[in-house]
Image (cartoon, rainbow, N blue to C red):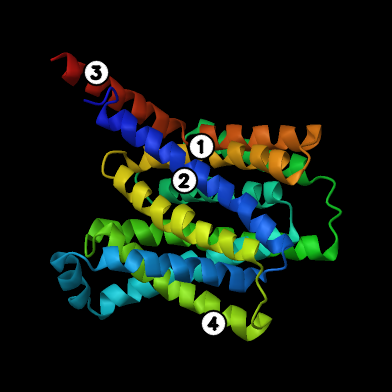
Amino acid sequence: MSRFSPHLRAVLQAAFVTFLWSTSWILIKVGLRDAIPPITFAGLRYTLAFLCLLPFALRKPEYRAAVRQLNRKNWAMLIPLGLFGYAVTQGAQFVGLDLLPSIAVNLLFSFTTVFVAILSLLFTSEKPTRLQWAGVGVYVIGVIVYFFPVNLPAGALTGVLVVLVGMTSNTMVSFLSRSLNRSRILHPIPMTAISMGIGAFTLLITGLATEGFPTISASGFAIIVWLAVVNTAFAFTLWNLTLRTLSALESSVLGNLMLAQIPLLAWIFLGEPITLKAGIGLIFAGLGIVLVQMRGFAALAALAAYRRVRTAE
């Protein structure tokens, strides 16, 4: 018998997935340095990942039946999920990493958590607390500290704009995927595979049309395969498995681990320096995210207390 409870096992598995996803940023930077064009790079990664997931998405009769029963309304949600979730968001991430340090891209993308929290609070009955608004302010201060003084070269400025487009797209995807999951029209595995396939082929066609057919080295090919099979197909499947046990808030909190993991890995493996100013900016940004989620942390504490009471009974 495992010494870990199902909940703790799910927490550890989710933390492991965030580590795999953090290593993706490092591998992408290495692949880009190996002259793999960014959009084609993203297209190859997710197309191969889609091909890996497809057999699992169609292996059960109920999965196949649900796919056949999808109507126009369902496809009207799945297609944008694929286009924004993969073609725009991931395409922007790869292009951003081609133009900016991974730490800067990570910091800008982390605003997704704050943006989603703000919109969720504004469009639900729950009003943001003063502490949560303070968290937004602290996060913004962190970004300003990191980038100040704003004296970016042309390529870096383009990278910032591209990443901001990707962050906005990622925020839209958070609400769209939540709506699809609540509707329960598809199991997460076929839903992920279908949306990934839509976005992946869009990326690949766009990349080949604009960047041409790349010459990929053996090491570059190995990176693409690893990213597709391990860091995408396997990691997404394991993450979906943890969602059966963890709440959406718990998953969101664990996802924030990447804000610390990516700078550390970039410093160790890419030699990207973490200056005192950059470190202070990252700390402020991380603190801001924590403050925005304070109401959720209180809910988690109450849930943990409830579980302890039930266990004692």
Measured from the top left, where is residue 110 in percent x and y? 58, 47
Q: Is residue 24 above or below residue 203?
A: above
Earlier-in-chain disc, 4 versus 3: 4
Which residue is label 3 attached to? 308
Amino acid type indicated by mark 4? Ile
Quarter of the N terminus within the rendering: top left
Q: Secondary structure at mark 3?
A: helix
Foreground mark, 4 or 3, reads 4
Which residue is label 2 attached to? 117
Earlier-in-chain disc, 1 versus 4: 4
Q: Residue at x 17, y 20 (%)?
A: 310
Residue 2: name its quadrant.
top left
Disc 2 + disc 1, Cβ < 8 Å: yes
Give whichever of 252, 59 is nearer the camera.
59
Amino acid type indicated by mark 1? Val
Which residue is label 4 attached to? 205
Earlier-in-chain disc, 3 versus 1: 1
Separation of disc 3 and disc 1 at Cα? 26 Å
Foreground mark, 1 or 4, reads 4
Which residue is label 1 attached to? 292
Q: Is residue 155 left or right of residue 237?
A: right
Foreground mark, 4 or 2, reads 4
